Image (tube, coloured by chain):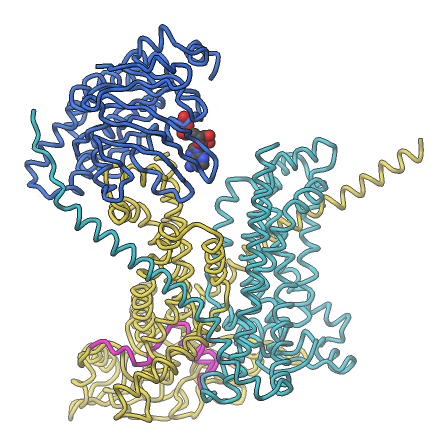
Amino acid sequence: MTLPRLTSSRQPIRLLQDRMATGLITAGGIGVLLAILAIGVFLVWETLPLLAIGDTLALAKLSPLAWGTLKAALAALLFAIPVAMGAAIYSALFMSARLRSRIKPALEMMEAIPGVVVGFIAGLILAPWVERHLASALVLIIWLPLSAALAGLLWQRAKTRLRRHLPLSWAGLWLVPWLAVMVALALWLAPWMEQQWFDGDLRQLLDQRYGMDYATRNALIVGLAMGFAVIPSIYSLAEDALADVPASLIEGAQAMGASRWQALWKVALVAAGPGIFSAIMIGAGRAVGETMIVLMASGNTALFSASPFEGMRSMAAAIAIELPEASPGGQTYHLLILAALVLFIFTFLVNTLAEVVRQRLRRRFRQMGGTL
Amino acid sequence: MTSASHTVSRRRRFSRVNDVWPWLCAASVALSLLMLGALLTLLLVRGLGHFWPATLEEVTLDSGETFAGQAVREVALPQRAGDERLYFTGNQDIEGVRWRWVAIDDIAESAQPDDLIRLDRSPWGDFIGRLVAIEQHDQRWEGDAAWQRLNALLVLPASQRQDSQLLLTTVDGQTLRQPLASVASAQAPNAMSVWQKTLAWGDAVWRFLSEGPRAANTDGGVWPAIFGTVLMVILMSVMVTPFGVLAAIYLNEIAHQGRLTRLVRIGVRNLAGVPSIVYGVFGLGVFVYGIGGSLDEWFFSDTLPSPTFGTGGLLWASLTLALLTLPVVIVATEEGLARIPEAQREGAVALGATRLEMLTRIVLPMAAPAMLTGVILAVARAAGEVAPLMLVGVAKLAPQMPIDGEFPYLHLERKFMHLGYHLFDTAFHGEDVQAAIPLVYATALLLVLIVLVLNLTAIFLRHYLRRQRGNEC
Amino acid sequence: MLASLHSANTSQAPVAHFSSEHSCLSIDHFSLAYAGKEALCELTLSVPRHRVTAFIGPSGCGKSTLLRAINRLHDLNESVTHSGQITLEGQDIHDPQMNVTELRRRVGMVFQTPNPFPMSIYENVAFGLRLQQRMPKRKRDDIIEWALTSAALWDEVKDRLHRSAWQLSGGQQQRLVIARTLAIQPDVLLLDEPASALDPISTLKIEELIRNLKSELTLILVTHNMQQAARVSDYTAFLHQGELVEYGPTDQVFTNPRLQRTENYITGRIT
Ligand SMILES: Nc1ncnc2c1ncn2[C@@H]1O[C@H](COP(=O)(O)OP(=O)(O)O)[C@@H](O)[C@H]1O
Ligand SMILES: [Mg+2]
């Protein structure tokens, strides 16, 4: 069979098209990247007028906000870090693979729940409840870890058959009803305990004996709500870091006779340390910038108070409330933009640090995985 | 010997204490699941339960006073003096209030008579009481006939029942004339069967989704907020998709893969962690005051000083959210591009394809699911984001929809309603928060469902993608 | 056809020279480096038209690098530098006048692992055609049938032309890739270990295909398999560490290598 030769008449058009498209993509790509860069430039530009005003006023206005931001973030991290780290350690090192493939996406779903929804539950449902049942809430915080430990002790004494049915590798799931029962028990007993130890009303006691005010929406509520929002991001990254620790490392430690937990504690946590650090950094970045939860659960009073039972006002919340009302070009406007700049720089630095640490760690593990 | 056994037992005990740690870790997982489950259950139960026709009670107090209402919740009285119960009594036009707290010990008798009805009226909200008669011109129906006539008339649009009047009485005997035109629906929940209640429930859910808010957001539905959210998100995707993909292609396929590109890549990745409120500030300063202000000066100077584009609106909101979600799309697309085997690109190039042809015919189609994943994740993030919108254009009650029959049909400068902001505003700035809370629950549930469904879609898409990739290699 | 072997300096330049009318492709003092690391060093050889020339040599000696250089695939990699000349039918392929896409159409390339596109069998073969020229569907169908027939695949796939190409077996995929290259009527076909990932039967099919294609075009075959080179090639070049060690008619290189290094490799003492 003889074929007609292909002509190359379209060649010039194709090359032209190619050259034009490359130019277009380059221009567009650089344009988009510059637009992103523009955020930083804009923020800096808009805060320049503040240089003329002097820094005392800026300091006076911003320091309670900075304090509030730190307090809220700290409260959230105090709750989130232990829970997220515990969950990460458990699911990376103890959980059965089948359960893990289901639980991990479920916990990561938590991250998707919008801040307004969490804020609404915290500000309108949780806060009044805690106000009425402060003693129960505090008892719960102590009671939950104790009941988990109790479950562990009971399990060690249990018959092997029971142990086989309820293995540690599935405990993340079957402890849920156990904890639910324990919560119910604590709530049932708490009023009685309050009666016995705190003369029936803990809040009154706090007020009278220690002079502590109690605000409905306070740092405790913010910590719980924002902690809930931050747990998934810390969990997800820390879990990745722990799961990436080469198995040979952990097995090596076990072969040397350490109990499994000691092996993990000493080896895995140390090896994954930088990854865990970056997970916490990213969680901190999220906690500092989260707006709606603080706005809805903190009471928004710009106070300098360290009490967990008093409210605060964070920078992000202040921006959301005050900036729409501030006249453009005015002093408040520039101050709030300064607050935004501070948030921007802080989160950007923290994230960059976390990213660099994480990449370095991953490279190290890859080398280790290769040589071992 | 003794000292040896001593250390052994000490070590035992030590290891036992050590063995508690894994359980604490497991409990962390359980606690997270418990909290997530509790949150979702709470939203589901309260969000959906609100639409279930509630039983109405006729309560007689020890003092002889009677009222009718729906029991809402019970709270312990201070000083352990028993419990008190909150009733929703409606009838704001007659009583002046809609809520009533009653100590349970004060209740002498409580009954659930079948003839209690509940009307949903447009001014004044709910009426709870009895139907005496219905009058149309000079005709008059009473008793059961009145109830049937009422239901028949309610099917008609409001304009066609201008001429009818209801004669109502509260349980303590006050009477009221109610024009039928202002009644939206009527129920006698105590007389309804479970099946009827289910139908009524479905109807109420539908009305919640399809109607606008009434009575200062404490009643009615969220349709404008759904519409505003969806429209804003669509506009945002239209803007973010091409630019995000363009930037990703540039970074991955065209840019020189050097140090600078790596830095830019880390920078883009980190922008995903910058708080959304910062993007809102940028949107307000640059889009609204900067660009919008200039547009007003050039094209809309006749309406100044009242701003057209120089104030928050649909366009600026979607643009701000597009910028906010740009990193999400860029990162996902880049991941997709990086996963395409080099052999595919070389195969195309070796057949004489130019770079453009290789990109459009091989690379982009293969990366399409990854891009889609990125866009869905971006949409999920944008749908739940409220803080930046508070700065660039959301409204608690937009008088006009952003799309209507008036030229140019799509009004980019208008303010719009948004589910998340609607939730925030109703819950925190409403006049009667107590009355609004059930609707807030329902709105929150709707928002969470939308966001979760979007995220699940993205997860499945990504999963499917990985599996497919696995097969091919 | 073999005009003269440079017998004068056999020890240094093992070059087979063909008169220009028989030479299709000639490589002249060509060197190439990846990020400064030299992979090809001063190669000089010419490849005869309508013959099968095999490049053999231990792994990492630069065979693939050379093939990719002929197709200018290294243009995609910024770190590659090169010097010297490669001429195709008397035209320098690095000449700025040279159109790269046209060069790649004229020099087809088949890779070690089959890389069909994620589309139907038909679309795979039509891919190159669609780029080159708009043509009526009937004509395109004819060309596709011809290409698949030439690649000895038509009978196996004619009933499922519109199914995904990824459902084919490895050997079929490789023949599909050959067919897709043949469809745009190249003058030279470069095959980089086309059978290394395939089973023995598929390998035999590919070898037979190579022998049949000789009448239509010039083939360059990179192979790891000594027997394969002996079975299908007319000329064999032996590369080692980026240098051309020996080049001549296949039976001569295999039965009577002039250099010890070649013999060591052929007998399996260098791998
Ligand atoms: N993309 C690349 N970047 C850097 N070095 C490469 C690359 N490809 C090949 N090389 C190096 O070039 C030399 C020749 O490789 P190659 O041509 O693939 O050998 P082979 O003869 O096995 O096909 C090897 O040392 C290899 O490490
Ligand atoms: Mg090779």
Chain C: what color? Answer: blue
**Chain letter, colour yellow:** B
Q: Is residue A66 visible?
A: yes
- Taking B412 as reference, is B352 above or below it? above
Q: Position of residue B247 (x, y in %)?
A: 36, 58
- Taking B146 as reference, is A147 above or below it? above
Which residue is at the far right? Answer: B2
In this image, B322 relative to A230: left or right? left
* Residue A343 falls in image quadrant: bottom right
Name the one closer to the observer, B387 or B131: B387
Q: Position of residue C33 (x, y in %)?
A: 43, 36
Q: Position of residue C12 (x, y in %)?
A: 41, 18
The residue sitting at 8% across, 41% down in the picture is C135
Q: Position of residue B66 (x, y in %)?
A: 46, 87
Q: Which residues are magenta?
A: B409-438
* Residue C56 falls in image quadrant: top left
